[in-house]
Amino acid sequence: MNSEQALIAIYPGSFDPLTVGHEDLARRTLIFADRVIVAVARRATHQKMLLFSVEERLEMLREVFAGEDRIECDTFDGLLVDFARARGARFVIRGLRAVSDFEYEFQMAQMNRELSNQIETLFLIPDLAYSFLSASLVREVASLGGDVSRFVSAPVLRRLNERFRR
Ligand code: ADP
């Protein structure tokens, strides 16, 4: 199957760091897509305070998804719709955990549609077990010495432990 026919989805985000909720969404995408590109935004949304560099976040993604040949990891700069077009992707995946995610996600999806009518945003909901989980909470709990081992995979846990080793 060449890339003209393959159904490719982009799952963009900060992934600071990747959580098992993000992983759930990336793998769920493969129910209907041939390939998913999990893409770290080089420019942070919401003026976020970031814990890990883009390169560290990409390395963690690659370690976690190693061996899953339908999941590719990358970074992107500039407009998401331009990146999607360049990679032959027609779909952007975003997650909706709670109503609180909706307003921002809705605005962004509408803006992306204004920028390119060729790219559709699809919203997926995670497993209920991950619906409370956010990268920012993981950062906060880990920074205070809490156990986040249920919320992140081993490569991410190792880096969090290194970062917050007392
Ligand atoms: P942002 O692009 O806002 O920096 P994140 O990197 O935190 O976002 O997350 C990327 C996407 O994944 C967002 O659409 C977010 O709603 C979604 N997401 C984050 N955590 C989860 C989770 N636990 N379950 C499902 N979706 C999630």
Image (cartoon, grey):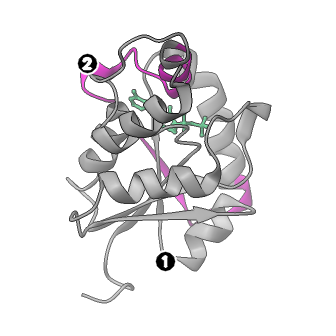
> Residue at position x 32%, y 82% from top?
5
Along the polypeptide, which appears first: circle 1 or circle 2?
1
Q: Secondary structure at mark 1?
A: loop
Q: Position of residue 160 (x, y in %)?
A: 47, 32
Please name the residue that numbered disc 1 is placed on: 88
Q: Residues within 10 Å of mark 1 (few under 14, many from 20)?
A: some
Magenta part of the chain: 114-140
> Residue at position x 41%, y 20% from top?
133
| Quadrant placement of the N terminus | bottom left
The label on residue 78 is: none
Q: Position of residue 109 (x, y in %)?
A: 61, 43
Q: Position of residue 124 (x, y in %)?
A: 36, 37
State how far apart marks 1 and 2 are (Cα): 32 Å
Q: On the picture, is 38 further left or further right than 114?
A: left
Q: Callout 2, which amino acid?
A: Leu
Please name the residue that numbered disc 2 is placed on: 128
> Residue at position x 47%, y 21% from top?
138
